[in-house]
Image (cartoon, rainbow, N blue to C red):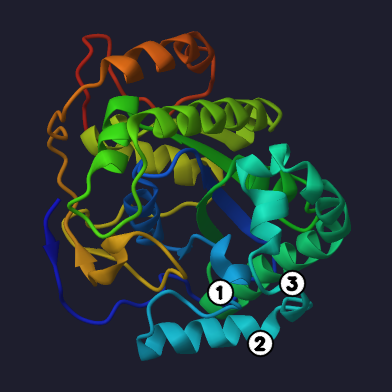
């Protein structure tokens, strides 16, 4: 994927809508391509890519990057969120959002105490982002399936789930890569993380209404961006023209991977290069294949011949 810097990015919204926020929540393992998927969605009219909003409390509403436009946008959001200051810090992440919180028994009382205020802040945050961006649809790429459970409980938000999957070999290779300035995991740890995240995501996915959920494979998205993006946005009932995939503005996401450091991206639809393959990964992830195969609906645009095709609306 080539990256080219140009002018300052701006949100893709218009006038602030009066309706309840429509939230596309992207869940699944890290390093699965959620940032570039979110950026692409954010280039559709009426859609705002908010980034990883799980970090909003942990960072006390201060965005990851400190450019003036981004700081101004998120300062306006922060001013409209009710009750956020009382929850600033990482306690909500550790007790509610992260998958390992299920095993932190000593954090269970904290989870019960924080759940009510946490949900109020989460809904207020989405409403504030909608108000400031003027967008009809907000994209949150926070990953965590347990955060998705909390958002499912919000009465003032229309939630649409995207379960993003990527070839486990590619995810493991990405976590093993020490040539980039991101945190790493060894192969065994990554496989355990993948197992837990995939299983929890599948459970959350299946308990969500069928018409408001979509399984998306990263490889399908790269092979046919217009088709996959069209299916995701269409799920929300929003009529948006596909973006220029050769000039995607990264916008003003709160937090994301290193992709958001560039202002404009060009999406390369060529198949990703095959990386090293791990026999351990193949063995450990194999039992999940039958479960994943049963998850529907999917955004796959593969024809009967097995070759991806691109369509433009």
Q: Earlier in the sequence, mark 3 or mark 1?
A: 1
Q: How far apart are the two marked residues, 1 and 2, measured between alpha carbons?
A: 15 Å
Residue occupying image coordinates x 35% and y 61% = 43
261 horizontally vs 132: left or right: left
* Residue 273 or residue 87, whichever sits in front: 87
Q: Quadrant of residue 90?
A: bottom right
For the C terminus, the quadrant is top left
The secondary element bearing badge 2 is classed as helix
Provide the residue designation for mark 3.
87
Residue plotted at (49% across, 38% down): 28
Instruction: Establish if 169 lies above or below 248.
Output: above
Residue 117 image-quadrant placement: bottom right
Query: Could you give the CA–CA distance between mark 3 and mark 1, rounded to whole angstroms?
Result: 11 Å
Residue visible at 36% across and 49% down in the picture:
37
- Tag nearer the camera, 1 or 2: 1
Q: Position of residue 183 (x, y in %)?
A: 35, 53
Identify the residue position indicated by label 1 in the image. 59
Element type where label 3 sits in the image: helix
Label of residue 13 in the image: none
- Badge 2 is on which residue? 79
Decide if residue 286 is on the left or right side of residue 178: right
Calculate the distance from the C-alpha at mark 3 to the C-alpha at mark 2: 15 Å
Is any atom of residue 182 visible in this view?
Answer: yes
| Category of crowding for the residue at label 3, using alpha-carbon neighbours closer than 10 angstroms: few (below 14), some (14–19), many (at least 20) | some
């Amino acid at each position: 994927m080539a990256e080219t810097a140009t002018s300052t990015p701006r949100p893709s919204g218009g006038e602030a809508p009066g309706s309840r926020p429509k939230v596309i929540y992207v869940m699944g393992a890290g390093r699965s391509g959620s940032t570039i998927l979110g950026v692409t969605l954010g280039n559709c009219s009426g859609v705002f890519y908010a980034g990883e909003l799980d970090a909003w409390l942990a960072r006390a509403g201060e965005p990851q990057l400190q450019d003036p436009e981004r700081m101004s946008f998120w300062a306006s959001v922060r001013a409209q969120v009710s009750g956020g200051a009382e929850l600033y810090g990482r306690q909500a992440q550790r007790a509610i959002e992260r998958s390992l919180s299920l095993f932190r028994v000593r954090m269970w009382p904290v989870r019960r105490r924080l759940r009510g205020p946490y949900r109020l802040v989460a809904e207020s945050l989405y409403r504030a982002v909608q108000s400031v961006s003027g967008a009809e649809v907000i994209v949150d790429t926070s990953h965590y399936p347990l955060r998705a459970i909390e958002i499912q409980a919000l009465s003032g938000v229309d939630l649409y789930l995207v379960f993003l999957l990527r070839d486990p070999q590619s995810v493991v290779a990405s976590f093993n890569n020490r040539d980039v300035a991101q945190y790493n995991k060894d192969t065994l740890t990554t496989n355990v993380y993948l197992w837990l995240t995939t299983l929890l995501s599948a459970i959350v996915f299946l308990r969500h209404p069928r018409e408001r959920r979509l399984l998306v494979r990263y490889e399908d998205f790269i092979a046919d961006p217009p088709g996959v993006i069209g299916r995701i946005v269409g799920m929300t009932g929003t009529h948006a023209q596909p973006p220029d995939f050769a000039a995607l503005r990264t916008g003003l996401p709160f937090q994301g991977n290193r992709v958001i450091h560039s202002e404009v991206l060009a999406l390369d639809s060529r198949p990703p290069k095959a990386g090293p393959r791990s026999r351990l990964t193949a063995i450990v992830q194999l039992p999940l294949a039958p479960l994943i195969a049963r998850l529907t609906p999917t955004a796959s645009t593969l024809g009967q011949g097995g070759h991806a095709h691109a369509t433009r609306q």
